[in-house]
Image (tube, rainbow, N blue to C red):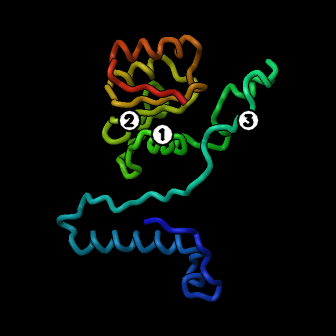
């Protein structure tokens, strides 16, 4: 379902019932429909997932760069140590990666922990992503051992330069066919 967040008329019954825009009405309709389906057929819908995700179109997660490197002085380069906008969440990055890779936004997503870092597994391990900071060789190795088709990390998230250097070699050792991407 795609819906613009058009405001409800303040005189409407929907507004009086607490719905500020049409999106909120749509969300409630989906909740009620899911509940009704499960109530009408409890034996066949016991584990049926009737949840949904609400997305909104936003600007890119990446910082805007309007100049070439030659136009910056060395002291300004620290501004670009992290190319991700400060207000973005790991989920924001995950959904951008899913869109970039052509993975359906309705795919199952499981958040787990590997070596103390939050890791997302999408579509049963087809994509594994970690956007945490201070990611170690241990985290990279455990992800590589799962043999995902895609593995995605945040460039500034690596604990050290040696982890970044070892990253490719770890995947070559444990999962050479994995497509690797660093944001």
The answer to whether marks 2 and 1 mark residues whose Cβ atoms lie closer than 8 Å is yes
Residue carrying label 2: 127
Residue carrying label 1: 97
**Which residue lies most toward the left here?**
43
Residue occupying image coordinates x 43% and y 66%: 1
Residue carrying label 3: 66
Closest to the camera, between mark 2 and mark 3, is 3
Q: CA distance from mark 3 to mark 1?
A: 23 Å
Q: CA distance from mark 2 to mark 3?
A: 31 Å
Q: CA distance from mark 2 to mark 1?
A: 9 Å
Residue 63 percent location from the top left of the image: 67, 37
Out of 68 and 180, give the one closest to the viewer. 68
Does 166 appear above or below 78? Answer: above
The quarter holding residue 51 reads bottom left
Residue 98 percent location from the top left of the image: 44, 42
Mark 2 is surrounded, within 10 Å at the Cα level, by few (under 14), some (14 to 19) or many (20 or more) other residues, namely: many
Mark 1 is surrounded, within 10 Å at the Cα level, by few (under 14), some (14 to 19) or many (20 or more) other residues, namely: some
Mark 3 and mark 1 lie on one chain; the one further toward the N terminus is 3
Residue occupying image coordinates x 63% and y 35%: 84
Relative to 49, 2 lies left or right: right
The answer to whether marks 3 and 1 mark residues whose Cβ atoms lie closer than 8 Å is no
Say which element carries label 1.
helix
The answer to whether marks 2 and 3 mark residues whose Cβ atoms lie closer than 8 Å is no
Say which element carries label 3.
loop
Residue occupying image coordinates x 82% and y 20%: 73
Q: Which mark is residue 84?
A: none
Q: Which of the image's four quarters has the C terminus?
A: top right
Relative to 170, 69 lies left or right: right
Residue 4 percent location from the top left of the image: 55, 68
Mark 2 and mark 1 lie on one chain; the one further toward the N terminus is 1
Residue occupying image coordinates x 38% and y 42%: 110
């Amino acid at each position: 379902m795609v819906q613009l967040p058009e405001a409800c008329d303040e005189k409407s019954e929907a507004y009086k019932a607490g719905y500020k825009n049409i999106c909120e009405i749509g969300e409630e309709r989906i909740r009620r429909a899911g509940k009704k389906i499960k109530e009408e057929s409890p034996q066949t819908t016991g584990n049926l997932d009737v949840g949904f995700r609400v997305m909104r179109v936003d600007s890119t997660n990446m910082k805007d760069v309007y100049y070439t490197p030659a136009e910056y002085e060395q002291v300004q380069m620290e501004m670009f140590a992290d190319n991700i906008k400060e207000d973005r969440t790991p989920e924001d990055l995950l959904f951008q990666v899913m869109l970039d890779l052509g993975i359906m936004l309705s795919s199952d997503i499981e958040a787990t922990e590997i070596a103390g870092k939050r890791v997302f597994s999408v579509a049963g391990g087809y994509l594994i992503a970690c956007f945490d900071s201070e990611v170690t060789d241990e985290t990279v190795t455990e992800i590589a051992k799962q043999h995902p088709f895609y593995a995605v990390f945040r460039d500034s998230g690596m604990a050290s330069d040696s982890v970044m250097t070892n990253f490719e070699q770890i995947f070559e050792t444990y999962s050479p066919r994995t497509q690797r991407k660093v944001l």
